[in-house]
Amino acid sequence: GQNIDQPTEMTATEGAIVQINCTYQTSGFNGLFWYQQHAGEAPTFLSYNVLDGLEEKGRFSSFLSRSKGYSYLLLKELQMKDSASYLCAVPYILTGGGNKLTFGTGTQLKVEL
Amino acid sequence: ETGVTQSPTHLIKTRGQQVTLRCSSQSGHNTVSWYQQALGQGPQFIFQYYREEENGRGNFPPRFSGLQFPNYSSELNVNALELDDSALYLCASSLAAGAGNTIYFGEGSWLTVV
């Protein structure tokens, strides 16, 4: 089975840095996704990590430690538009070759002035 | 803009009724998945279609069914609606092979069952 844990809510200040953690337990690891979801909108892809280490993409970075079952999403120079839910998800490969995602409950980030 | 389109965007149904939700996948994507997202929760996998066949199913009862058409578009049908079916239904498209293939979501269909 697969189990994902992430904090429910976080609050940070505009211009600051915030780290959103995700721990996972999965039978067979095939990488980890981060998605951003604004209220009332679809989740949008942020990052995919399959190897240990930090991957940087502009203001957003994602880190993975496979041995610890742990990932984090780092958001720098926070902007008000970063207020959203951040979803951690792990893929499970289906018999036919496609994959399904198991999501955490999401971390609701509120950016304040 | 992910290229995945869904309709309708919002609808209200009465308990016991049936509903059909529609999805057009991103150009070139041959796999369509459906997810249910309750308020304050992450999306839950319902099922996936590949080459017009169901290719995996989550923990949802048989009254949730689907179709995929030759142009890769898809439908989600829910019979005998229950109040707990009220949720955002997300369609997602991807290429079939590889765990790392990004799954792109549509804007979703908001279903309210009263």
Image: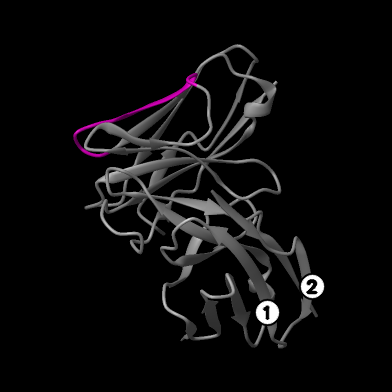
Name which of mark 2 and mark 1 comes first in the sequence.
2
Q: Is residue A24 visible?
A: yes
Cβ atoms at labels 2 and 1 below 8 Å apart: no
Q: Is residue B66 shown in magenta?
A: yes
What is the chain letter for disc 2? A
Tell me the tag on residue A19: 1
Find residue B23 and report its horizontal and vertical position in percent.
Answer: 38, 38
Find residue B54 and report its horizontal and vertical position in percent.
Answer: 32, 32
Could you tell whether A99 is left or right of A41 in the image? Answer: left
What is the chain letter for disc 1? A
* Disc 2: CA contacts within 10 A as few (<14), some (14-19) or many (>=20): few
Identify residue for label 2: A11
Find residue A87 and report its horizontal and vertical position in percent.
Answer: 59, 61
Please, is residue B108 above or below residue A64 in the view? Answer: above
Point out the image quarter for the N terminus of chain B. bottom left
Quarter of the view holding residue B74: top left
Please check whether the numbered discs 2 and 1 fall on a single chain.
yes
Q: Nearer the viewer, mark 2 or mark 1?
A: 1
Decide which of A37, B1 is in the foreground and name it.
A37
How many labels, in total?
Answer: 2
Decide which of A63, B6 is in the foreground and name it.
A63
Decide which of B9, A3 is in the foreground and name it.
A3
Could you tell whether A113 is left or right of A34 in the image? Answer: right
Q: Amino acid at mark 2?
A: Thr
Q: Amino acid at mark 1?
A: Gln
Q: Which residues are magenta?
A: B62-72
Find residue B22 and report its horizontal and vertical position in percent.
Answer: 40, 33
